[in-house]
Structures are given as C-alpha cells and as structure tokens.
Amino acid sequence: MLKKFAYSLLGLLLLPSLLALGLALYQLLVDLQIDDTGRALLTRFSMGAFGWLVVFLLITRPVKSYILAHELTHLLAAWLTGVPAGQLSFHRDGGSVKVARTTLWISLAPYFIPFYCLLVLFAHVVAQLWWDPARWSFALPVLLGFTWSYHLCFTVYSLSRTQRDIQPYGLLGAYPLIAAVNLLMLCLAVSAVNEHPFSADLRLILEHQQHIYSVLYRRNGLNYR
C-alpha cells in the first residue's frame, strides 16, 4: 500500500507536466511545418497513423500480434537492465515473461516503447547498408506513423482493461507516467527531424515545464525561486 501511495503521489505531481509536454509538442509540430520537407514528413506520418486508425476501428484488431510485442518488450526491458529473463509465452487472451525481479521500467516498458516502430527503424538502418535509402524515403514516415498509431491504439485499448503490470503502481501512479513518457517520445521524435538544434528543442520542453509548475506555485501562494 505504501508503494502504491508513493507512485500515486508521483502521478499527481506529473499531471501538470502532461500539459507542459502537450504544449511543447504542439509548438514543435507548428515549427516543423514551416519548411516544405518538415510539412511533407508530417503529412506522410499522419497518413500512416490515420491508416492504422481506420484498420483498428473498422476492419480488424490483431490482438495476438500486440500481445507478442508486449511480452517481447518486457523481455527486452529486462535484458537492457541486466535482469535475467526468459520463458516467454503468449496467446490471444494474454501472455507472460518470467523475470528474476520486476521493476517499474520492466513492468511499464510495453506502454512506453513502440515495438514495431523500432523494428521499422532497425530494418531501415540495416537496409541502408546495402541500398540507397532514397528508394523508400516516402514509405518510411508512413510506416512509422502506421506503427506508432498501432502502439498508441493498443496501449489505450489494453489500459482500458485490467492489467497486472499496472496493479502494483495503481492507476494514478502508472497512467500519468505512461502518458508523460509517450508525449516526451513524440517531442523527441519531432525534434529529430526538424532543423532546430536538439539543445534548442530540449530547452523549449524544459521551459514549458518550468512555466507550468511556476504558475501553479504562484497560485498556491508559494515563492518560486
């Protein structure tokens, strides 16, 4: 109970950060559309994202493929942090991975990491070792938009149901953190393709955070230094 209370308190403290990240993402997207290249990339990404949304809402929901990605992400998160893991199993109704110990990172990684986006990027990196990436320059942002929308739709879909991964941290502890990390990843993804220096975009994100929290402190009669 003490652990769940601590994470719930952290989730409450993160709520203003969601607004700040949303504002930062909006400004980064506006800046991206200033030049023709950025506008074209955003259009293609949006095409892919909308394409998956249509598939998800109107055609089919390949739940088993998501469960496989979900469990593989648990496994990857454990390996990256040096935690022994193995014995992966999955089926249409769920799956599991045995790990030596669980952490916040291992438990929530599938809700942070767009697994199939990483596969697309990995294939892109490997393929350009032998072929000119200009061959698929149009398709890459479309595929990334499609797989990111896949990640987002299934994250919302799975979180609308009871998840054992979430229970140790509570809804108030896990949901704001999941939303914050996804917004931050989108901000960083937009920053990676625009013409601004990364340091400038990072400063923009931090300034929005500082502004939102300082406004809250002033409204509560606190001195912000």
Image (cartoon, rainbow, N blue to C red):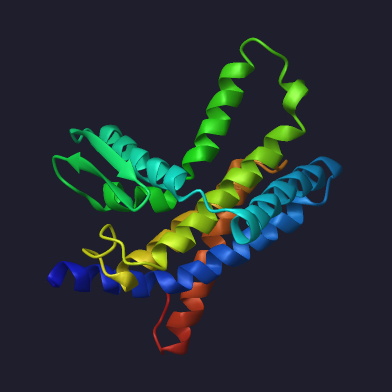
Residue pushed farthest right?
Answer: 36
Q: How many marks?
A: 0
Query: As drawn, is 78 to the left or to the right of 122?
Result: left
Q: Which residue is nearer to you in this view: 149 or 95?
A: 95
Q: Which residue is nearer to you in this view: 220 or 156?
A: 156
Q: Which residue is nearer to you in this view: 169 or 31?
A: 169
Asked if residue 33 is positioned above or below residue 124 in the image, the reply reads: below
Query: As drawn, is 84 to the left or to the right of 76?
Result: left
Residue drawn at x 64%, y 51% is 52
Image quadrant of residue 5? bottom left
Q: Which residue is nearer to you in this view: 154 or 26?
A: 154
**Residue 33, x across and y down, in percent:** 79, 52
Asked if residue 9 is positioned above or below residue 22 in the image, the reply reads: below
Residue 31 seen: yes
Residue 225 seen: no
Residue pushed farthest top?
Answer: 130
Residue drawn at x 58%, y 53% is 60
Query: As drawn, is 147 to the left or to the right of 12?
Result: right
Quarter of the image that includes the N terminus: bottom left
**Residue 31, x across and y down, in percent:** 75, 54
Residue drawn at x 70%, y 54% is 50
Quarter of the image that includes the C terminus: bottom left
Query: As drawn, is 97 to the left or to the right of 118?
Result: left
**Residue 92, x across and y down, in percent:** 38, 49
**Residue 30, x across and y down, in percent:** 75, 58
Residue drawn at x 54%, y 39% is 117
